[in-house]
Image (tube, rainbow, N blue to C red):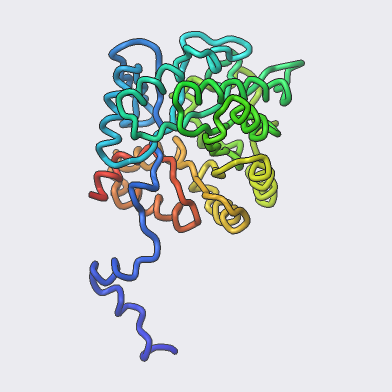
């Protein structure tokens, strides 16, 4: 059926019609809000490259989590900056570490909030890499034991879900086995299964003080030109016990989100990362773009590509816009 019998514009004439046939919807339940926690008290430190995002001490973090929960955002993901760093990232798996204490404080104050924790060593190591260094390289198998230990301490503190982001081979199985052995078989794993070695992480590395002190992470994070490899990585993590599969970054990898969604029978998360956030914030601050419209358009594109969940620093703003 062709023009003039069929006229697609008939269903675009006004907002009510457009809403009625809209194919993709953003909901508050789609969002996970990333948060940074630091030592100290009464700390609410702005992150210059991420306007509107802060590093919080635990007391201030709890206040912020209460606000996030009041906006009906169901989940947060925590990233910690420890008091001290060392070669083996020992603060990552200390029972009284910054994340472990933050989890307990949040669950005491806002028990209904879903608390997800990043499981990695990069914020905690003096060299900034995601694992143990041997002979100048990250030792995959030695790192697995520490990641598993870290995940268990998070579960013991009250975390609702753990999210390994290190990209070590076999880490999902190591964490699943450790959680099950420790009595936490009910704790799900959201795996950063498809994490590219991206330049879009720059502002995050400033926020989390996690930039590598030598080299880079291309020996363990994925090569950006590769697409089929993403399916292999996702399938491996599903086989090892991952409950949710993540693609990171989101906007430069919408094709990957789509491919993974088609290939994997698990919920799909996509991380709208710090560089994506910073670009839109900078353009809006200069008056070059309408912030609300471009943010909603960007996040809808992530949902349209196939993401069930979106980790985004825009979560609070969008929750207010959706009211």
For the point 61% across and 53% down, the residue is: 264
Residue at the spot x=50%, y=8% of the render? 84
In the rendered image, the vertical position of residue 61 relative to residue 275, given as above or below: above
Residue at left offset 40%, top offset 35%: 114
Specify the farthest residue to the right. 135
Number of numbered discs visible in the structure rendering: 0
Q: Would residue 220 appear left or right of 42 to someone viewing this image?
A: right
Horizontal side of residue 181 vs 91, given as left or right: right
- Image x and y of residue 242, in percent: 60, 41
Q: Is residue 66 visible?
A: yes
Residue nearest the observer in this picture, 300 or 77: 77
Q: Position of residue 134 (x, y in %)?
A: 74, 16
Q: Nearer the viewer, residue 42 or 288?
A: 42
Going by the image, does 100 lie left or right of 243?
A: left
The answer to which image quadrant residue 33 occupies is top left
Q: Residue at x 62, y 33 (%)?
A: 176
Q: Is residue 223 above or below residue 296?
A: above
On screen, residue 298 above or below 271: below
Find residue 138 and report its horizontal and vertical position in percent: 70, 22
On the image, the x and y values in percent for residue 310 come to: 44, 45
Viewer can see residue 218: no
């Amino acid at each position: 059926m062709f023009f003039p019998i069929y006229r697609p514009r008939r269903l675009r004439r006004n907002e009510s019609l457009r809403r009625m046939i809209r194919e993709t919807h953003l909901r508050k339940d789609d969002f996970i809000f990333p948060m940074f926690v630091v030592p100290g008290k009464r700390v609410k430190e702005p992150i210059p490259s991420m306007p509107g995002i802060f590093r919080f001490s635990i007391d201030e973090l709890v206040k912020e989590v209460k606000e996030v929960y009041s906006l009906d955002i169901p989940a947060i993901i925590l990233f910690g900056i420890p008091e001290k760093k060392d070669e083996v990232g020992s603060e990552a798996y200390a029972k009284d570490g910054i994340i472990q204490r933050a989890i307990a404080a949040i669950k005491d104050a806002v028990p209904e909030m879903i608390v997800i924790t990043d499981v990695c060593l990069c914020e905690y190591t003096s060299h900034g890499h995601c694992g143990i260094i041997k002979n100048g390289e990250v030792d995959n198998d030695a790192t697995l034991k520490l990641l598993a230990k870290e995940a268990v301490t998070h579960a013991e503190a009250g975390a609702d879900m753990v999210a390994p982001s290190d990209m070590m081979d076999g880490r999902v199985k190591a964490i699943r086995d450790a959680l099950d052995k420790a009595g936490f078989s009910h704790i799900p794993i959201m795996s950063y299964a498809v994490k590219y070695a991206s330049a879009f992480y720059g502002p995050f590395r400033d926020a989390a003080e996690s930039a590598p002190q030598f080299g880079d992470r291309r020996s363990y994070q994925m090569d950006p030109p590769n697409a089929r490899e993403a399916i292999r990585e996702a399938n491996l993590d599903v086989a090892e016990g991952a409950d949710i599969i993540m693609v990171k970054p989101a906007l430069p990898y919408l094709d990957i989100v789509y491919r993974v969604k088609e290939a994997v029978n698990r919920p799909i998360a996509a991380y709208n990362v710090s560089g994506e956030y910073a670009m839109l914030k900078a353009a809006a601050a200069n008056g070059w773009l309408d912030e609300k419209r471009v943010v909603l358009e960007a996040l809808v594109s992530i949902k349209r590509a196939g993401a069930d969940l979106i980790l985004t620093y825009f979560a609070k703003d969008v929750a207010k816009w959706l009211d």
